[in-house]
Amino acid sequence: MQIQHNISLQALHTLHLDVSARFFYRWQENDKLDELLAHAKNYKRTIWLGSGSNTIFLQDVDDGLVVQIATNGIEVIEEDEQVRISVSAGNNWHQFVQYTLANGWYGLENLSLIPGTVGASPVQNIGAYGVEVKDHITRVFGVNTDNGEAFVMNNNECQFSYRNSIFKQSPHLLITEVEFVLSKQFIPHIDYGDIARVAQAIAGNEKLNANHVANAIIQTRKAKLPNPDKMGNVGSFFHNPIVPADYAKELLQKYPNMPHYPQADEKVKIAAAWLIEQAGLKGKKCGNMAVHQQQALVLVNTGGAIAQDVIDLKSLIQSTVLERFGIELICEPRFIT
Ligand SMILES: Cc1cc2nc3c(=O)[nH]c(=O)nc-3n(C[C@H](O)[C@H](O)[C@H](O)COP(=O)(O)OP(=O)(O)OC[C@H]3O[C@@H](n4cnc5c(N)ncnc54)[C@H](O)[C@@H]3O)c2cc1C
C-alpha cells in the first residue's frame, strides 16, 4: 500500500483549514479494497473522504488513516424506457450529472453543480431545487468496515430523509457503488424559486429541455453561492429546522413573513437562513470566519481561518437563534476532531 505521510488536507476539504493527515491513502482501484481494509486495521480509525465538501477537519489527524475515495467507473445495468446504472463512489458528482444529460438520461439535472462525489451523495441524501437524490437511487453497494462484510441496500433500507440516511448515522458503512434509475423522458421540475423563469430565458424559442434546466441551476448557484475554490465554505452550514406545526403557528403570529414549508406529519420546515438573518448575524465575523453577506446559511473562511474561529461562529449563531426563536440549529457538515 502506498501510504503517504504528513499530507496537507487544506486543498482536500472545501473549508480549507490548514490541517494535515499523518497517514494518507488515495484509493483509486476498486479491486484494492480488500488489501486496503486489511491495512486499515493497523490504525485506530479510518476516515473516508470524498471531495471534503461536507467535512470539516478541526485538527490534524495523527491517530488514523485518511482515505480519499477516487475510484472511477460507470456501468449500464439495464436499458429500456428507463436506464439503470451503477456508478463507483469516487466519480465526481457534477461530471456524472453532465454525463447522464449527454446520454439523454434525465432526473438529476436539478442537482447540477453540487460539489462532491457520487459515493457521498446518499450519505446526506443530497438535495436542491425541489429534488433529492433518493428519488433516483435504487440500490447502494458497500462494505461494513467493522466486520468486512459486503452489503447491498435497497432504497427503503437506506432510510433516506431530509439530509439524512443510515450512512450519515453509521460511518462504518463504506459505500463503494451507487445504482441509479433515470428516465429517458424529460419531466421538468422547475417550480422552485426562480428556476422556471431562468430556464425559459435560456431556452428562448426552443422547447424546454433538461440542459436548459441544468444550465439555469448552474447559473443560479453560481450567482448565489460562494465558490469554495475562491472562498472556503461547506455550502449550508445548518439544516433547515423542522418544528411541530403548533410551534410554527406561534412563531408566525410574531413573524408573519417567516418563510415556512409545511411537511408531512404535522411538521413545518423553517428557513435557517432567515432565522440567522433576522437574528442580525449576516456578515458577522469570528476571527477569519464570517456569515456570508449574500447567503446567511453559508459560513465562509475569509482567509486563514482556524478551527477556533469555526467553533466560535457556529456557537454564536446557535446560541443567538436559540435565545431569539427557541430553535436549535443542527450542523450539516461532519466535524473531524
Ligand atoms: C458550495 C457548496 C454547495 C453545496 N450545495 C449543496 C446542495 O445544494 N445540496 C446538498 O445536499 N449538499 C450541498 N453541499 C454539501 C456537499 O456538496 C454534499 O454533502 C456532498 O455530497 C459531499 O460530497 P463529498 O464527496 O465532498 O463528501 P465528504 O465531505 O468528503 O464526505 C461527507 C461525509 O460522507 C462520508 N463519505 C464520503 N464518501 C463516502 C463513501 N463512499 N461511503 C461512505 N461514506 C462516505 C464522509 O466520511 C463524510 O462523513 C454543498 C457544499 C458546498 C461546498
Image (spheres, rainbow, N blue to C red):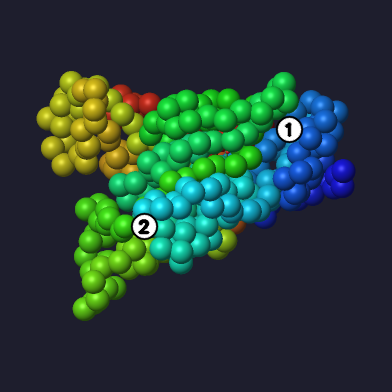
Residue 50 visible to an observer of this rendering: yes
Q: Residue at x 45, y 52 (%)?
A: 79
Rendered location of residue 31, percent (x, y) = 76, 43
Q: What crowding class fits label 2: few (fewer than 14 Cα within 10 Å), some (14-19), or many (20 or more)?
A: some
Q: Quick one: label 2 or label 1, which is nearer the N terminus?
A: 1
Residue farthest toward the bottom in the current orientation of the protein:
205
Residue at which label 2 appears: 184
Answer above or below: position of 137 versus 205: above
At 37% from the left edge and 63% from the top edge, which residue is drawn?
214
* Circle 1: element type: strand
Q: Nearer the viewer, residue 50 or 19?
A: 50
Residue located beneath label 1 in the image: 46
**Which quadrant does the N terminus fall into?**
top right
Residue 282: in sight, yes or no? no
- Kind of residue indicated by mark 1: Thr
**Which label sits on residue 30?**
none
Residue at 57 percent across and 61 percent down: it is 229
